[in-house]
Image: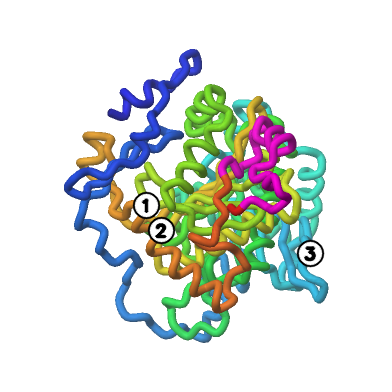
Amino acid sequence: MLQHLYGEVNRDMQPQIIPETSYLMRMADGTIKQVNPLTGTEVWTVPGRANRPLGVSSGPPAPLDPDRHEAHCAFCAQRYLETPPEKARLVRTEHGFTTLRHLHAEALFETAAEFRRIPNLFEIVSFDYWQQNFSYRLPDVLELHKQNYLASEAGREHVFQVVDQRLKASGMDEYARERMTPEERLQLANAFFGGGHEVIVARRHFIDGATHDDQLASSGTLTSEEHYQYLRFTIDAMRDLYINNRYVRYVAVFQNWLKPAGASFDHLHKQLVAIDERGVQNEMELQRVRANPNLYNEAAVNFAAYHNLVVAENEHAIAYAGFGHRYPTLEIFSKSERSQPWNHTPEELRGMSDLVHACHAATGSEVPCNEEWYYKPPDVDVPMPWRVMLKWRVSTPAGFEGGTKIYVNTIDPDSLRDRVVPRLFQLKNEGRIAPMKIAFECACVPNCLRYNPAVRQQESSHPEFPPLSDGRAAEG
């Protein structure tokens, strides 16, 4: 069914159109079959498999050791020197937040970083990859920062310590490490100043005032303002990666929350990875959106609205229970006419942030999940909207999925909506998320995503709901 509906990924062929009737089908026995209109992924939800606990349980919570306050893992505030030299940090001031860039080692503990931007010690795409395949070298501004950082004894000692930590973790024995010259060690340090794999680390490991180890600080436990700053700071880093390496074609942005979702530390952080390709997901979608420029309205948001899957909406974004995903997935789309996050206005960014934050809060800190960002690669010639997916990692694909490429998702879209919506109303009433419309409150106006120029032109010439002939406004 999958190959019949989707066809092979081929740049020279138009993909076959997936019929709308295949997106979401309920069988007589209650089995729900789904096909993702953007990827062709086929998913089944079988009756009776959804009533399972979702959160991670590791036994009774243990009291926190007060002697380890802000030192629980390498991302914590008392252990700044265990991570590579940071590129920037966001600090709180009496007037809000401000960004400090390229701090020296001596200044790391002079301020408390709400969020830090640091290189990943173990890169997915290494600095050597860019250097050997593209003859990439550090831009002058980054080379100057490197020299300034290494000019002090504290900075040099920090860099050598982290290089040694990386070599040791990679399996190099002590004798081999001792034989390396300082120049060889400094060559490895280039990745700390100009690499393309970065981490945005939040200040808290546990929520403020936590007493037990089950009180982790997640995206949902941030305030709406903190989450907005977290998102904005991440976008600033994304833009920087493009600017500092002209060979980058796409920067993947994602967040792994809890170990079942791939996190090394149960400490809130996002990752950014620069790559020299658009990625398979973008290539597949690009074929489809060229065939139907209004694809994301018609096959995503409009369809979700017609099937009562929308969970929240504000002026600048809309969120719904997704369909055709391997895992239960909440999708949040920006309504902006701009295709890339760094070109959004502050109001548009806040609108997206508020809905992503609300979906995290409704999910809960105990549920492992991945946050994935999708947006138009800079070298693509057609508009594509920015969207964020929250995937609940509450099941493990096994032999059936591998052999059939049909994935069993234990929570169907309707059930996902019914889990999330009451929680959103509760959070809204408690003032823990930003004001927004929830479920039946949402307007769900067709074609609300304005990335498509044809939709914008239609809006300007033909309002959705024109006044009635006697001057009264039409009822929605």
Magenta span contains residue 257 = no
Label 2, on which residue? 417
Residue carrying label 3 = 98
At 47% from the left edge and 55% from the top edge, which residue is drawn?
256
Task: Give the residues drawn in magenta, as a range.
Answer: 446-474
Q: Is residue 280 left or right of residue 245?
A: left
Viewer-nearest of labels 1 and 3?
1
Please provide percent x and percent y for residue 474: 64, 50
For marks 1 and 3 on the same chain, the one whose residue lies earlier in the sequence: 3
The percent position of residue 269, horizontal first and vertical second, equals 56, 59
User: Can see residue 142?
Assistant: yes
SS at circle 1: helix
Q: Main secondary structure of the magenta part?
A: loop
Q: Quadrant of the N terminus?
A: top left
Q: Are marks 2 and 1 in contact (CB under 8 Å)?
A: yes
Query: Is residue 458 highlighted in magenta?
Result: yes
Residue situated in front as seen by the camera: 356 or 31: 31
Residue of label 1: 413
